[in-house]
Amino acid sequence: MVSAQSESTIKIDPHQNSLGVPFIEITDLPVLIAKWETRVSDFEIFVKESAYSWEEKTYFPQTGDHPVVNVNIKDANAFCEWLSKRERASGKINDKQSYRLPTNGEWDVASEVETQVDLTKKTTEVSFPWGKAWPPSPRAGNFNSQELDGTDDGFIYTAPVGSFQSSVLGFDDLAGNIWEWVQDDANKADEATLRGGSWQYFNKESLQSSYRYVVSSKLRRPSVGFRCVFEDKARAETLLASQKRILKEKGDQLMARSKTTKDEVEQLKNKMSEKVELTADEKLAAKNRLLNDRSDRESFVNSLGITFLLLPDSTGLISIREIRPKDMMNWASITGKKIGNDSILSAEEMNAFCEWLATRERWQKVINEKAVYRLATKTEQSGSAGSSE
């Protein structure tokens, strides 16, 4: 994934709901995400105003500033629906705006998940909402720290929201305090996913930014709560239009720099065979020949900067490296697709990526209408192994 820290602009508190919860905007993300978890005081107002049937109690003391717990995903969704209707009725938000639970993809962006560098390997770049250090610093979050490293973070159970150091993007308690419901990626209808760990946990795996805990959607526990996102469809439409415009501009630039006549190609080949030093523009032109003319294409660089070389049997071109995580996450972010729970991407996900990339590059006129991207066969992979130097 592209790190939001390095490539995104953060604006804190561009929106605050009627309960006083601030939301953080991350450039290129179509929603705003609550700075902290839904509190006891927030949920009490919801139960009172809506007469919602919920009488759960904790076995430990909490104030109104603690995160609400003992809520299942149905309770969390009901809260979001109530808050949306409440604020529309008061005129605070319009009909195109609403509150809901975050998706796994949105959670990944907020917690700056770093996925594996090599999609063919099972290893991952381990990261946490506070960074890559392990164990975490005493101010990183509310965990079972006595078990984790023998320290005392000051809280036996839940802590008031915002009691610990905020993440680089400005969020509180993305790791620890309580598990948080997200909206998608469950394997079955009666399952749902939790993210972030809780005050009970000290296991390294469960505190990783990428960790997904699939449980019963009916689960109510004193370590489980949620936070909301604020969705503005008008903003999302504007953002999508902007992304399409940027993609078209980049495609136009690539087209302008890629066009090379057959005579120019021959001249470049002669220069290369004579070991004459090429200029930067000539090197780029040599690489970025369009797929429209198969007669003399031996290499091609697509809009993601991936170089493709001609297969030995001349039936197509094959990339010289694996797809990068940031390419996959860009696809997931733009299309709203879901990346699976495994560290290894499924064939279905990879095929969906190939189809998206082909559609995008046809629209950009980087490739022609008959050109496609697909997964390489084992024969093609083995046949090209010695030709990528």
Image: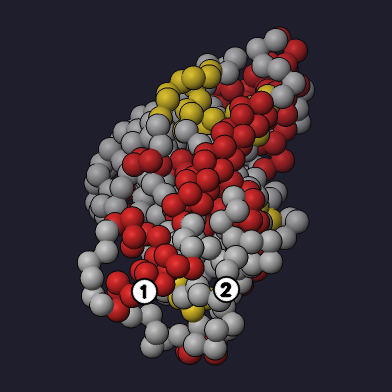
Question: Taking 359 as reference, is 35 left or right?
Answer: left
Question: Taking 109 as reference, is 368 left or right?
Answer: right
Question: Which colour style is shown?
Answer: secondary structure
Front one among 149 and 55? 149
Q: Residues within 10 Å of mark 1 (few under 14, many from 20)?
A: few
Extreme residue toward the top, this view: 90
x then y, percent, for residue 297: 50, 73
The vertical placement of 262 against 246, above or below, is: below
The vertical placement of 63 against 155, above or below, is: above
The vertical placement of 275 against 52, above or below, is: below
Query: Residue 63: in sight, yes or no?
Result: no
Q: Amino acid at mark 2?
A: Arg
Question: Taking 331 as reference, is 359 left or right?
Answer: right
- Residue at the location (30% across, 74% down)? 272
- At numbered mark 2, what does the secondary structure look like: helix, strand or loop? loop
> How many numbered marks, from 0 up?
2
Give the CA distance from mark 2 to mark 1.
16 Å
x then y, percent, for residue 226: 57, 37
Front one among 389 and 144? 389
Q: Amino acid at mark 1?
A: Lys
Front one among 377 and 306? 306
- At numbered mark 1, what does the secondary structure look like: helix, strand or loop? helix
x then y, percent, for residue 124: 39, 65
Front position among marks 2 and 1: 1
Question: Which residue was labeled with disc 2?
Answer: 294
Question: Which residue was labeled with disc 1?
Answer: 269
x then y, percent, for residue 380: 53, 85
Question: Quarter-wise, where is residue 130 in the image?
Answer: top left
- Residue at the location (33% across, 36% down)? 168
